[in-house]
Amino acid sequence: MCSATRQRRWRHRTLAVATSALAAGAFLVAAQPQAGEAAPPAVPEVADQVPQLVESGVTGGPVSVSAQAASPRSVCAAGAQWLRVRFTDLSLRGNDSVTLTGSRAGSFTLTAQHWPGKAFHTRAFEGDCVRISTALSDPASRFAIDSYQSGARPLAEATTTVAAVGDVCGSSCNQTAPLIKNMNPQALILAGDNAYDSGSLSEYKSKFDPYYGQFRSITYPTPGNHEYNTSGASGYFDYFGRQAGERGKGYYSFDVGDWHFVALNSNITHSSGSTQVTWLKNDLAASTKPCTAAYFHHPRFSRGTHGDDTGVNPFFQALYDAKADLVVVGHDHNYQRFAPSRPDGTRDDVNGVRQLLIGTGGRGYYSFDQSSAAVQEKGNTNTFGVSRLTLTATDYRSDFVPVSGRTFTDTTSGKCKKGVSSPAFSIGTSPSTVSMKPGGTASVSVTVGSSGGFASATALSVSGLPAGVTGTLSPSSVTPPANGTATATLTLTASASASGSATATVTGTSGSVSRTANVAVSVGSGGGDVFADDFETDKGWQVNAAATDTATSGKWERGDPEQTTSTYSDQIKQRGDTTSGANCLVTGRLAGSEYGANDLDGGVSSMTSPAFTVPTGGKLTFSYTLAHGDNATSADYLRLRVLDGTTPATVFEKLGSAAEVAGAWQSATADLASFAGRSVRLVVEAADAGTASLWESAIDDVRVTA
């Protein structure tokens, strides 16, 4: 098995606050000092808050916003794709409200029901600003915002990983713990019966802790019936402490990205009018998140030995009424996926809640010997494993990952019922800074990105270029696919007498809506970058652009790589870091259930860059890492080629060999002078072309300079 330690890279963004003249009693908005690239100042803790776990690569910082009057303001982070803000106080009276609107898409109105007395993070809003407007008539209404979080990649790409499993230790949780380590999740949720047979503190220490104790800081547990074989589940509450919720209750909630998670206790009173169910209804009503999941021990639906449990129907009814999306349970020692259902089991693909029964943590197996009121879509009775939940602001994907030696898997996905965003588009440029010589040319890739299903023609234009520089966009209008991207090329041409610098504006217009992106253009004798990509945003690279790739897994992708470590050589193969930022180009970024699960297999995989014009004396610099096992051969390779028209030329190559090689970031250069004045593309290739072998590779910080 492999470890997958992901590096957390926190960086500041410049915080801007839209300011107009302040009238008496208007918002007080103040940006806090920033500290370059240092870690952001710690956000002050508050006594009562809804915990917020963030997506990988999220940045943020402090801000001060408070109000007693209805004057709108905006909190902004330059270059952000989305923002969410944290309220430390929200006390609204009567029908008073606060409305948050993203500069690109998304709007939500906060009312008196939303987290009274608690600090909380809102849902994310698309764009680089969140506009805050109010409708306040009661002088006692108030609110305060103290910080923000933001992301540099589109909201649809901002994912969090949660591991989910129940019925754990058992005699075989040593097999499932490595799966969680490889997933490197932001959170681990437990669906009860965590330490057999009685959930005593000594059993937690002797059976659970040796294997699952390593995840304790990210564990969000619930108790099962076996925990209550010890009076009051005291062993459970003693072991987990505050992470288990209030002693004697054991129900609580927290947020992961744009998901709200609710941990419930199906072992104590949970009738319709009980304190717990009343709390649940209020908690669900208070949440501002677009997606909701709940987990507890006893399944509403099961074809296993324990069968359907109508006693948890009040949980299911409250979740159904609140348009929740997922329920995770255990109790039966098997895996079962049910269709989205109403509380009575009737299939409902529009408003139903999907239940995942994951009683596969390491305690025996139960067969399917009962009928169920709901529709079981998939099931298995002989495989231990853990489900990996991959979550975005609009949807989820669940992958059942089996222990080593087992082959059963299952994948399902769905949309969040309250996660639909309005159609919108964005404009991006790469590179965003261009240096040219008089008489020279340069190319800029212009990307139109879709969100919320936007798929309309977008006209492109450029303005504000330095004197003597002209710009041509090809094509001049693009139509991105829904939730995808479309790319055009801006060709800049400098006359022999051109000089000076200016910030040019690329504008995309669709109907009455316009979006812009800037390009800093300078003309002088020194030259500079003509193409640069640190892979933090999508600059338009294409996978298998020539439609000739043969790889079956581990294909090139842009993303945040997960570290893998060989159990054969104890070497790090795929690195879990990059040379800058959070992302790079990598062959199969996920760690998988074992270190060879997502390596390159089956042949060649390629990535092709946007077009750019090579300057006189052009030089390519980049960082790379490759690693392989002792079963590699010289037929395996990492290669960079320059595509001049249809003819590729290799400018860098590393071949495999019959020796273990560990992953390590290295720098490389290539002379592109022979391509001066030509419009070319870079092609990054990796191949596991001989006998199947372990092969991992990555590329970062590509730069072409004069």
Image (spheres, grey):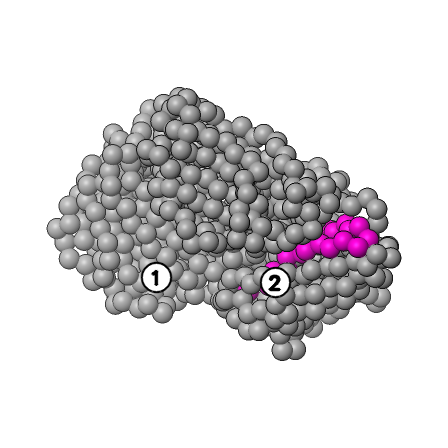
The main secondary structure of the magenta stretch is strand
Q: Quadrant of the N terminus?
A: top left
Q: Is residue 357 magenta?
A: no
Q: Is residue 524 left or right of residue 370?
A: right
Of circles 1 and 2, the one toward us is 2
In the image, residue 529 above or below residue 312: above
**Magenta residues, as a range?**
433-450
Query: Which image quarter: residue 235?
Result: top left
Helix, strand, or loop for circle 2?
strand
Quadrant of the rendered image containing residue 601? top left
Front in this rendered view, residue 684 or 390: 684
- In the image, residue 442 lies at what x, y percent? 71, 54
Callout 2 amino acid: Ala
At 50% from the left and 31% from the top, the residue drawn is: 654
Residue 446 in magenta stretch: yes
Separation of marks 1 and 2 at Cα, in angstroms:
42 Å
Which SS class for mark 1? loop
Decide: is 682 above or below 277: above
The one nearer the camera, 117 or 222, is: 222
Residue 529, image x, y percentages: 72, 46
Give me the residue at 69% from left, 60% from top: 491
From this viewpoint, is residue 450 visible? yes
Quadrant, the C terminus? top right
Residue position marked by numbered label 2 in the rendering: 488
Look at the picture and state if 702 lies above or below 64: above
Q: Is residue 93 visible?
A: no
Residue 396: x %, y % from top left: 41, 55
The image position of residue 558, as x and y in percent, is: 52, 47
Graded by Cα atoms within 10 Å as few (under 14), some (14 to 19) or many (20 or more), the crowding at tag 1 reads: many
Residue 71 is left or right of residue 663, and the answer is: right
Query: What residue did someone put label 1 on?
Result: 353
